[in-house]
Image: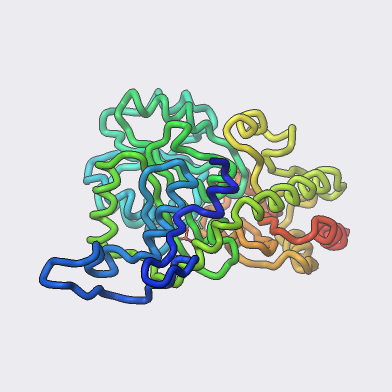
Amino acid sequence: MKFATKAVHAGARPDPATGALTTPLYQTSTYVQESPGVNKGYAYARGQNPTREALEDGISLLENGKNGLCFASGVAAIDAILRLLKPGDEIVTTTDLYAGSYRLFTEIFVPAGIKFRFVSFEDPEKLKEIISDTTKLVWLETPTNPMMNIIDIAGIAKTAKSHETLVAVDNTFATPFLQRPLDLGADIVMHSATKYLGGHSDLIMGAVVVNDDTLYQKLKFIQNTCGAVPGPNDCFLTHRGIKTLHLRMERNCWNAMKIARFLSRHSRVDQVNYPGLESHSGHELAKKQMSAFGAVLSFDLKDDRTETAIEIMRKMQCFTLAESLGGVESLVGHPATMSHGAMPREERLAIGIKDSLIRLSVGVEDADDLIYDLEQALD
Ligand SMILES: *Cc1c(COP(=O)(O)O)cnc(C)c1O
């Protein structure tokens, strides 16, 4: 079955009691038992809820996985995955990481005895030099935020396999419409479903998809034991979101490509970071492992000053100033003072985040209006 068909029908289960086409919102904490221990497969809603189950099945189908699990947020999903490890185990990950993941790793899991190595994955051969028997997990995201660097998932997975190291990919930016890490050899896919899967900037949600039964059972145990589960209402909305994922992503990516081309021709713009541009270092790899180039991009200015960037962002009317991405509406952010504000300036500059860097999450509005907005703000 092709992606669009799957997206519309993934996880759908008409209500057995009424035939309601759409999986109902089972707003309940518990389930009636016929006699002690005898139930219809649901005992208590932390363990499972049919609305959540339909969403978990849906996301897992889109990722070509066997089992899905949903969490109260993207970071709760990451937290659950890292709980697979024990003190002394090592995680190899990248310097170019979502700021919330970095904070979770260094502030919660380092004190708990997990070791981390931060490297640049732009050359997948790097992993060969540093991977060891204590490396239990490789964690990566691609495209990265906000530089949109592309990491070779298949290359990393090949090296990791030879050491029996798990590979987890944060697939939030690409979504399964553009990239399916399990098909490329990864063991675990993670999402902040808050972003494109939900797609309407109205909820917080996390997801994990795996192919291996043992791994699934361990994660399911963690999900129920630690309890960071989403409520049924957010599951219902996310499930509604994924039905139009392919439509939204097509328009998001098309708009982003047009905007990237416009910006790369503008006299005030210095560099545009978008893997769809031939000039981007990850362009060839992106063409290979993704079906389009995503809808987040960043650019910096020839006048590389925070004040200049802020002045331009203030003039924008179609792009709303806010954290987050992946919704139907276009958003703009300033990494140096927002997402990466806590990072020392030298470290930030070393990964390419200049003072004037502006990040766009391109929505599904009319591309002409978005370009006109950028044009008047830049002029
Ligand atoms: C937003 C985000 C997260 C965290 O997800 P929440 O739903 O906000 O907890 C993790 N990874 C990436 C790439 C993100 O953009």
Q: Is residue 63 above or below residue 119?
A: below
At which x and y percent is residue 352?
A: 62, 43
Q: Which residue lies furthest to the left in this view?
A: 36
Q: In this view, does 36 lie above or below 181?
A: below
Residue 83 appearing in the image: yes
At x 28% / y 64%, what residue is drawn?
Answer: 227
**x and y percent of residue 224 in the render?**
25, 61
Question: Is 360 located above or below residue 293 in the figure?
Answer: below
Residue 198 x/y as whole percent = 54, 61
Q: Where is residue 103 in the image (x, y as percent from the top left)?
A: 42, 56
User: Which quadrant would residue 235 be assigned to in this image?
Assistant: bottom left
Q: In this view, does 228 lie to the left or right of 358?
A: left
Q: In which quarter of the image is the C terminus?
A: bottom right
Q: Residue at x 85, y 43 (%)?
A: 265
- The one of 244 and 126 positioned closer to us in this rendering: 244
Identify the residue at horizontal 33%, vertical 23% (top origin): 162
Residue 279: image quadrant is top right
> Which residue is pictured at 37% across the width and 43% down the height?
66
Q: How is the image coloured?
A: rainbow
